[in-house]
Image (cartoon, helix red, strand yellow):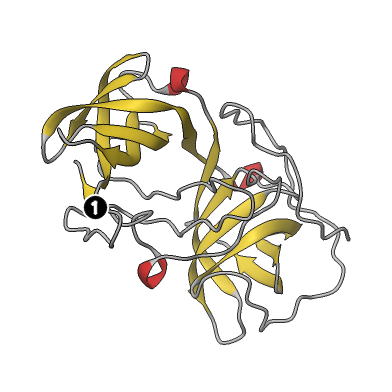
């Protein structure tokens, strides 16, 4: 089976294509149970086999087996544009704040509003350069402590109340309405819940859950992610304790 990482999948503006039933990928050899290619309680890389509710994910250090159940949640993240930032959607924007405290966002994650509104959502910053290592998903916290050199880094999250070009007003839980500027070169992604049928061989995926004594990841959530700028499934996980704010930073909402 081909194990090459590069692919160009999911790079369109969030198209939830009907992927059909992909539960019968051809099986070859079983991966080594001890292979670890991602973070402690999960796995990330290219999906190379689908056997019912068992997945094989390959990364720089080999294959990892991932299993899922009917309670596992699935999310697909795709490349979006500024036009996708619309009134009523939820956003989590990260970037730099100026002397007046205004945020210029360089990374924006769009997600649909749920029955509970736009609570701070799990965030997986996309790679910003070839070979960059994404950090695991995290829920931003108001008490995030900036790291040295990152004093101006910040984020704003909440519901979009108005959007006019690069100016976006966000209703935050903590600080009310805040207007941010989306940088012209900002990386914008869009996420939505999907079903297991959206899984396809060749996709980049990230599984979060627990790893058993045999090295098998039992996934509580699986995210289908776009390939990095170099067309590869980036798999490194940096940051403080496996998940901090990119570059340090402070909460903006």
Helix, strand or loop for disc 1: loop
Out of 186 and 9, give the one closest to the viewer. Answer: 186
- Which residue corresponds to mark 1? 151
Horizontal and vertical percent for residue 20? 72, 38
Residue 118 shows in this picture: no
Q: Quadrant of the N terminus?
A: bottom right
Horizontal and vertical percent for residue 213? 56, 87
- Quick check: 154 left or right of 194? left
- Quick check: 83 left or right of 89? right
- Quick check: 147 left or right of 75? left
Horizontal and vertical percent for residue 2? 87, 58
Pointer 1 local density, CA inside 10 Å: few below 14, some 14–19, many at least 20: some
x 46%, y 17%: residue: 83
x 45%, y 60%: residue: 136
Out of 152 and 191, give the one closest to the viewer. Answer: 152
Snapshot quadrant of residue 3: bottom right
Q: Above or below — where is 139 with respect to 89?
A: below
Residue 96 shows in this picture: yes
- Quick check: 168 left or right of 6? left
Out of 127 and 37, give the one closest to the viewer. Answer: 127
- Outermost residue to the top: 164
């Amino acid at each position: 089976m081909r194990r090459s990482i590069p692919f160009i999948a999911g790079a369109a503006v969030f198209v939830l294509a009907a992927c059909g039933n992909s539960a019968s990928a051809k099986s070859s050899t079983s991966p080594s149970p001890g292979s670890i290619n991602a973070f402690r309680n999960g796995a990330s890389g290219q999906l190379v086999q689908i056997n019912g509710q068992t997945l094989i994910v390959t990364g720089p250090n080999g294959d990892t087996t991932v299993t899922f159940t009917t309670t596992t949640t699935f999310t697909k993240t795709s490349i979006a544009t500024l036009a996708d930032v619309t009134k009523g959607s939820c956003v989590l924007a990260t970037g730099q704040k100026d002397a007046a405290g205004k945020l210029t966002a360089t990374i924006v994650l769009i997600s649909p509003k749920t029955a509970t509104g736009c609570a701070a959502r799990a965030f997986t910053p996309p790679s910003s350069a070839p070979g960059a290592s994404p950090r695991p998903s995290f829920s931003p916290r108001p008490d995030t402590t900036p790291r040295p050199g990152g004093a101006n880094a910040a984020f704003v999250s909440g519901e979009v109340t108005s959007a006019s070009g690069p100016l976006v007003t966000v209703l935050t839980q903590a600080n009310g309405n805040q207007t941010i500027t989306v940088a012209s070169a900002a990386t914008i992604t869009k996420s939505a819940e999907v079903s297991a049928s959206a899984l396809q061989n060749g996709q980049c995926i990230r599984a979060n859950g627990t790893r058993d004594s045999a090295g098998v990841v039992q996934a509580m959530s699986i995210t289908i992610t776009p390939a990095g700028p170099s067309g590869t499934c980036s798999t490194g996980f940096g940051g403080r304790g496996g998940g901090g704010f990119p570059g340090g930073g402070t909460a903006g909402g």
